[in-house]
Amino acid sequence: MAEEIPNLIAEERTGTGKGAARQARRHGMVPGVVYGGGIDPLPIQIPFNDLLKRLKAGRFLSTLFNLKVEGHDDVRVICRDVQRDVVKDLPTHLDLMRLRRASKVNLFIAVDFINENEAPGLKKGGVLTVVRPEIELIVTASEIPENITVDLTGLEVGDVITISSVNLPEGAKPTIDRDFVIANVSAPSSLKSSEEAEGDTEAPEEETVETPDEETPDE
């Protein structure tokens, strides 16, 4: 399970409609609404600078948050939409959805590589090339893994790690159907350079040019 879900701190917004939303923006807030979970929607507002910082950090639409609003119980939410100004591309409104424990959600989960010392290919100087440091999974809100563990034991130079070779947490499923690559053990650059150098020093095969027999002049 994930050890910590980031907090998203908001305030309850008084009033609804365009007038109340404009007033929130004038005070440096971004209006929004929290819906779902079998209860009434809750109008909220979030400090503009805080929201913009999170948006710039990336993965905002696929990150699970612990929403904290004074006077209300904490609840797990995920952002389903961020409306932006068509000219400035700055956030003007956001929609958050409450999640029940059995809700399914798409999240990016970090990949953790272990037992590097048990990989013969790495001991020989091979390099672990990580293609996907995170993998987007469909998980249950109550069973979110902290990371995905990839065991490097026994890997040789040239071996490839795909999603099908990884044990995923129970109930988790990749959002991509095909068997994609997570990482591989590639040859060290020194070995590649030496092989290329050997190839360059090989003498080219001499071509034998056959000359036609001289014709005997007519007597």
Image (cartoon, rainbow, N blue to C red):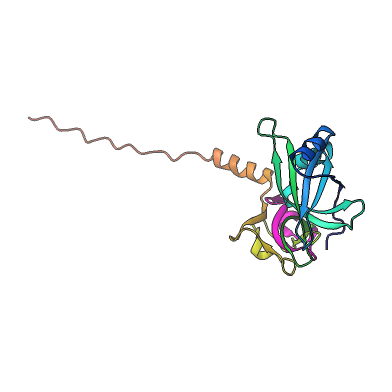
Residue 109, x across and y down, in percent: 75, 56
Residue 29, x across and y down, in percent: 83, 38
Q: Quadrant of the C terminus?
A: top left
Q: Is residue 126 in view from this perspective?
A: no
Q: Is residue 61 in view from this perspective?
A: yes
**Snapshot quadrant of residue 195:** top right
Q: Is residue 21 above or below residue 156?
A: above
Nearer to the camera, 99 or 6: 99
Query: Total label count?
Result: 0
Q: Is residue 14 above or below residue 143?
A: above
Q: Is residue 163 above or below residue 199?
A: below
164 displayed left or right of 75: left
Residue at figure coordinates x 83%, y 43% from the top left: 46
Nearer to the camera, 117 or 146: 146
Residue 77, x across and y down, in percent: 79, 55
Residue 149, x across and y down, in percent: 77, 61
Nearer to the camera, 114 or 12: 12
**Snapshot quadrant of residue 52:** top right
44 displayed left or right of 181: right
Tell me where the magenta segment starts and ends, as one range: 117-144
Query: Would residue 121 be counted in the magenta stretch?
Result: yes
